[in-house]
Image (cartoon, grey):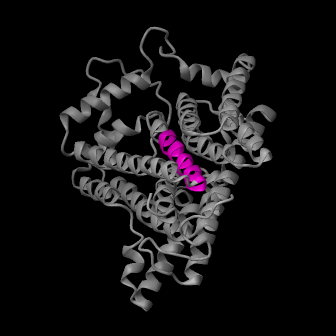
């Protein structure tokens, strides 16, 4: 990168623009790296352990950070330490509504478990990533960790499914969770690699997006990757980047057609169909969407309570057929949010998406006007990631444990790029 960011590369800052303790910065960077890379392994190697699903590596990294940050706060009495790194009001409002919805939940333990994991990542994870990204160097370290996680996840899935005929989708096992994970990471990391001045990095980005496309297994992943990469294609300034995007997407589609008879690809073909397995009814996924709309109409204020949608949803099919063919984690995250915590919760979640989309877009415009090439690169990469995340949320919720942390990371990247790149 030929130009300098407006903030000094050697100066570590907090969200409030104040210097931070060196050891706290190093700890945050280390734990953030662990959380990001370990997210690629999801709940491996203890997939069926409920305890491990809560205390998996990425969640433990956040918990350790919370404990150290609390100690620092109590010993140093640095009140700005926590306050300056807290997430935006829209996120706190969404979390508050989710916690309050527990009052209407039929299963309090389920709702509490869901809300605790939500708070852990939305607040603890957000502050961890905020402190980790304190200068241009750590920002690039985070992008590097995300790229490593994406490569690990896609590579293992491709090797397992095509090399050893595994039925599962890499470390995530489920096609929809895997699709949401790579649907966010592959276009974001691909965009980061495409915009690199190094040809080898652009080649790696092309291979990564192609691999994610072929291994996707779900409509949500294809849509997220396409729209995320398309966002970069629209915003990018150079033809080499557009060429890389075009090649990766066209080759990905071409490979899907060439491998159409392969049992691995047949899973994706089935997910693309509008009709259900009986060939008569609409696919259960879309009937489910209507049931969630019905639920939201009947319980617009209270919803079902956080994490409790499955205990009410069956009552809202009305005359629609309930075929019991819906697969695990095949869920519209937008509608599920409204159905679980009411219209106010859905509005708050839309507020989050709109606020960070507006912020990222303003960064792109400002960087373009001021000719900040590095800032423009980061801003477009982050915007591509956010578009991909919002698209993936249509087909599998971002709120699943192990997936939410990646969405929060995208939000923090947008927030920290705003600070590190000056008045954008």
Q: Residue at x 62, y 64 (%)?
A: 4
Check the image and name the residue furthest to the front.
Answer: 370
- Quadrant where the N terminus is found in the figure: bottom right
Residue 304 in view here: yes
Residue drawn 19% across the image and 34% down it: 298
Q: Nearer the viewer, residue 415 or 310?
A: 415
Vertical comparison of 5 with 266: above or below: below
* Picture coordinates of residue 260, whole percent (x, y): 70, 17
Q: Quadrant of the C terminus?
A: bottom left
Tell me which segment is drawn in magenta.
373-389
Observer-nearest residue: 364 or 398?
Answer: 364
- Between 216 and 57, the one lying in front of the other is 216
- Measuring from the top left, give residue 223's x and y in whole percent: 53, 30
In front here: 86 or 182? Answer: 86
Q: Position of residue 234 (x, y in %)?
A: 54, 34
Number of labels in the image equals 0
Q: Main secondary structure of the magenta part?
A: helix
Q: Position of residue 235 (x, y in %)?
A: 54, 38
In the rendered image, the vertical position of residue 119 relative to residue 201, given as above or below: below
Residue 388 falls inside the magenta stretch: yes
Specify whether residue 233 is painted magenta: no
Query: Is residue 56 at all visible to an observer of this figure?
Result: no
Q: Is residue 305 left or right of residue 231?
A: left
């Amino acid at each position: 990168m030929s130009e300098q960011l407006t903030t000094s590369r050697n100066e570590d800052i907090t969200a409030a623009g104040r210097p931070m303790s060196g050891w706290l910065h190093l700890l945050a960077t280390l734990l953030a790296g662990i959380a990001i890379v370990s997210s690629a392994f999801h709940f491996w190697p203890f997939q069926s352990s409920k305890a491990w699903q809560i205390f998996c590596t990425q969640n433990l990294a956040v918990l350790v950070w919370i404990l150290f940050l609390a100690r620092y706060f109590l010993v140093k009495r640095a009140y700005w330490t926590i306050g300056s790194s807290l997430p935006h009001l829209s996120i706190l409002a969404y979390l508050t509504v989710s916690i309050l919805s527990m009052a209407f939940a039929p299963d309090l333990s389920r709702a509490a478990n869901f809300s605790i994991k939500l708070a852990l990542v939305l607040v603890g994870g957000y502050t961890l990533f905020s402190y980790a990204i304190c200068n241009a160097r750590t920002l690039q370290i985070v992008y590097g960790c995300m790229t490593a996680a994406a490569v690990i996840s896609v590579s293992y899935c491709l090797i397992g499914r095509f090399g050893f005929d595994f039925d599962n989708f890499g470390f995530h096992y489920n096609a929809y969770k895997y699709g949401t994970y790579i649907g966010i990471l592959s276009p974001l990391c691909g965009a980061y690699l495409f915009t690199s001045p190094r040809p080898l990095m652009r080649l790696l980005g092309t291979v990564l997006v192609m691999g994610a496309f072929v291994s996707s297994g779900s409509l949500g992943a294809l849509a997220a990757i396409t729209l995320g990469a398309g966002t970069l294609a629209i915003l990018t300034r150079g033809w080499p980047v557009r060429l890389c995007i075009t090649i990766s997407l066209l080759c990905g589609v071409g490979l899907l057609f060439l491998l159409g008879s392969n049992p691995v690809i047949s899973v994706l073909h089935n997910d693309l169909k509008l009709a259900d397995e009986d060939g008569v009814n609409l696919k259960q996924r879309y009937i489910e969407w209507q049931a969630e709309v019905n639920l939201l109409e009947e319980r617009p204020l209270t919803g079902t309570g956080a994490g409790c949608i499955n205990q009410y949803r069956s009552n809202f099919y009305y005359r629609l057929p309930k075929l019991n063919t819906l697969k695990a984690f095949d869920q519209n995250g937008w509608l599920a949010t409204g159905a679980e915590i009411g219209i106010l919760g859905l509005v708050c979640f839309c507020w989050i998406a709109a606020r960070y989309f507006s912020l990222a877009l303003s960064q792109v415009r400002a960087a373009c006007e001021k000719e900040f090439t590095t800032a423009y690169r980061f801003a477009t990469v982050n915007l591509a990631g956010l578009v991909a995340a919002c698209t993936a949320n249509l087909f599998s919720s971002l709120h699943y444990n192990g997936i939410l942390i990646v969405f929060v990371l995208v939000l923090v990247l947008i927030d920290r790029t705003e600070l590190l790149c000056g008045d954008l």
